[in-house]
Amino acid sequence: MFSKKSTTNYFSILIHLLKWTLIAFPVAALVGSVVALFLWLLDVVTNFRFTHGWLLYLLPLAGLLIWWLYKTAGKNAESGNNMILDEIHQPGGGIPLRMAPLVLITTIITHLFGGSAGREGTAVQIGGSLSSLIGKRLKLSTDETKLLLMMGVAAGFGAVFGTPLTGAIFALEVVYIGRMNYKALLPCLIASFLADMICSMWHIHHTQYHIQIVESLKSSTSIFHFDLLLIGEVIIGGALFGITSLLFSEFTHTVKSYSKEWIKVPWLIPVIGGGIVILLAFLLGTNDYLGLGVSNPDPNAVSILNCFKAGGADTWSWLWKLIFTGITLGMGFKGGEVTPLFFIGAALGNTLGTLCGAPVDLMAGLGFIAVFAGATNTPIACTLMGIELFGGEYALYYAIACFTAYYFSGHTGIYTAQRVINKKG
Amino acid sequence: MFSKKSTTNYFSILIHLLKWTLIAFPVAALVGSVVALFLWLLDVVTNFRFTHGWLLYLLPLAGLLIWWLYKTAGKNAESGNNMILDEIHQPGGGIPLRMAPLVLITTIITHLFGGSAGREGTAVQIGGSLSSLIGKRLKLSTDETKLLLMMGVAAGFGAVFGTPLTGAIFALEVVYIGRMNYKALLPCLIASFLADMICSMWHIHHTQYHIQIVESLKSSTSIFHFDLLLIGEVIIGGALFGITSLLFSEFTHTVKSYSKEWIKVPWLIPVIGGGIVILLAFLLGTNDYLGLGVSNPDPNAVSILNCFKAGGADTWSWLWKLIFTGITLGMGFKGGEVTPLFFIGAALGNTLGTLCGAPVDLMAGLGFIAVFAGATNTPIACTLMGIELFGGEYALYYAIACFTAYYFSGHTGIYTAQRVINKKG
């Protein structure tokens, strides 16, 4: 019944699986533990900043320190996430090990002094850098190195957000625009799952978000089992979330290129960037747009968690967070873009929900995942993230919002090293 | 901020979206309505067979009738799903319109007389054939025709199972082994969503499945938020589900090729096939493995629904359903493979759950999606199907089972026209 060729073929699949499962253990142990350390530090410095508001005034100095750290110890490590994508496309010099501690320390500095940034970039770089270290020890081939780096990305992403399935699909999806590669499907899931598990063994807990739409929605007496008006709002929301991703990417890239062009002394860029952030916070009279923004000790502050409640964000909160983050990351501070993207999306969702009378928590959740989907061109990972974070009940809405945002964000994104394989139109 | 080129580029994406959204409406209306008719007829004939057991004895004659219908009216329509995949790879002669009524009528005949078959193949062929008809009117280019056919497949699949998200991802995933193409992402989701909506406007309801694991599992006091023993069982289950997919594909292909080799008179093949099914039912003393198998008026019968309950299937139920279906479909009867694959998987999951003390409903649900994932090489669509049918709570388990089954099913599958783009190992 089975030919010899297909049997040989079959065993090579099993050996491939076994080998990568074994490699996944050290990758996950290392990445999961360092990410746990990172998350713990992040929590410590964020809470410290909340009680020591004056730290913000040192942000320009912090920027100078970050610049100096990368200048003296960074070498080629500054290109960050894009270097990891480039290495997956075409393994070359490898990811320098110094990338992991450097990005960890500089992200912590950014957050301690109130820069508006995230954490996924840091986690992905920790994952890439540490898995590359393991790869060098194992003397892997070019193809094997690609796979290993994808596992590192999956492990970092899965652990930092506590979403293992999303981490795996993100790693497969982020490399190319318009295609998902299955070669690393199970190895990435194993790495991401184990890294998340190890991260929780270190007693790291992730924020819980809740979407609890009024029951009347579900028991609708409509002949459809969908609410057509809501679907329409989700589509329009998806389009706006996609346009917002585009705006974010373009704004950050523009800030980066203009500050290089206009400010000729490199170390002045983060100093001025820090100054602008202080000025903006002063003009707006609020610190809500500093730091990670997931939660806030002030119950009336705008934070991601509060965006899920009616009245939890102002009409333009999303735009302010976009500007704060674009300046922070475009002018030399470190950290990820994703948590700010969550913030921008959830705040915009809150505004849209309020304006069109749609459920605010659902719209905030959709913005949370869809702005991210548009900015990173990973619509399926983000649909799964919605399911992992908010539950599967609204999976179809997640997909509609993320897929729509994916189209409306155009062919750019926050990772310039992504390659366009299938044009969107 | 935006260059002229990227603006032009952006508008071409929006025009692409608008165009395909408009095309999705007639595709969905047509496919959704015909699938509704098909599901209604299927329900009528299945209930009729339950009350008229003697119909089984006419199965060989029914086989002869199906052979004659394809012989006189079929021309090239017999290659079915594989022809649709071939046309997506390389649009050529187009899908003949006759495929839709022919496969609908012959599937209904198969089910009326108790052949063990499914319905997704039929729905996908209805989708492909009807969308191809629309494509000819619109005079589409080669690339546009590919996209249209994928929309047809998505619409057919989404409507027949009531799972629009799965339908869309299935259409993107099924074409190649090891790659997902995003070109048609949103058009497929729109088509699948609308077709499902139109199907429910015709008052077609889909079977509800439930997984309700004992609460103790969730409130586990373990330091992990996962149950490691259960994860181990899910991985082993996934491997066995994958091997079962492989067995199913190989058995069906083998039955097909041997019956062509051994039975020189073509019309005798379905006649003998029908005879074997009757003989097997007689020897086993049960009609449980005939027809679709979703539910059964006898509360003690083995059916997909009962597989979710402890004691709802016998140890070898999965193997019997595999043999019944392989003979039915391998010897000239019509219908899909997917519902029987659900049955085989759910029954095997029931057996495994009983043997290792794992929750029977969860294991049945995992088998349901994972055997299908292995046989069609669509692990992500099947993970999403788990979420759409059983809820998102166990999404990670669905992914582990489906991804593992994907590797363990090797490079074959029920669709021989799939092309291997990325080897699994």
Image (spheres, coloured by chain):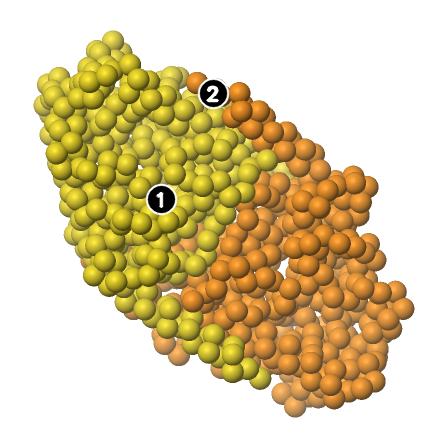
Chain colours: A orange, B yellow
Circle 1: residue type: Leu
| Label 1 in the same subunit as label 2 | no
Q: How many marks?
A: 2
- For mark 2, what is the residue? A2
Q: Which residue occupies the foreground of this view, B214 or B28?
A: B28
Horizontal relation, residue A38 to residue B89: left or right: right
Q: Would you place residue A313 above or below residue A370 in this image?
A: below
Furthest toward the bottom, the residue is A283
Q: Quadrant of the C terminus of chain B?
A: top right
**Could you say whether the residue bearing mark 2 is in a helix, strand or loop?**
loop
Query: Image quarter for residue A106?
Result: bottom right
Q: The disc numbered 1 marks a residue on which chain? A: B
Q: Position of residue A184 (x, y in %)?
A: 60, 44
Location of the N terminus of chain B (image quadrant): bottom right
List the residue tagged with mark 1. B85
Residue at (20%, 21%) from the top-left corner? B266
CA–CA distance between discs 1 and 2? 24 Å
Q: Which chain letter goes with mark 2?
A: A
Q: Nearer the viewer, residue B245 or A201?
A: B245
Is A108 displayed left or right of B88 in the figure? right
Q: Label 2 is placed on what type of residue?
A: Phe
In depth, the one of A5 and A371 nearer the eye is: A5
Question: Callout 1 environment at 10 Å: few (<14), some (14 to 19), or many (20+)?
Answer: many
Q: For the point 28% across and 36% down, which residue is it?
A: B79
- Farthest right residue in view: A72
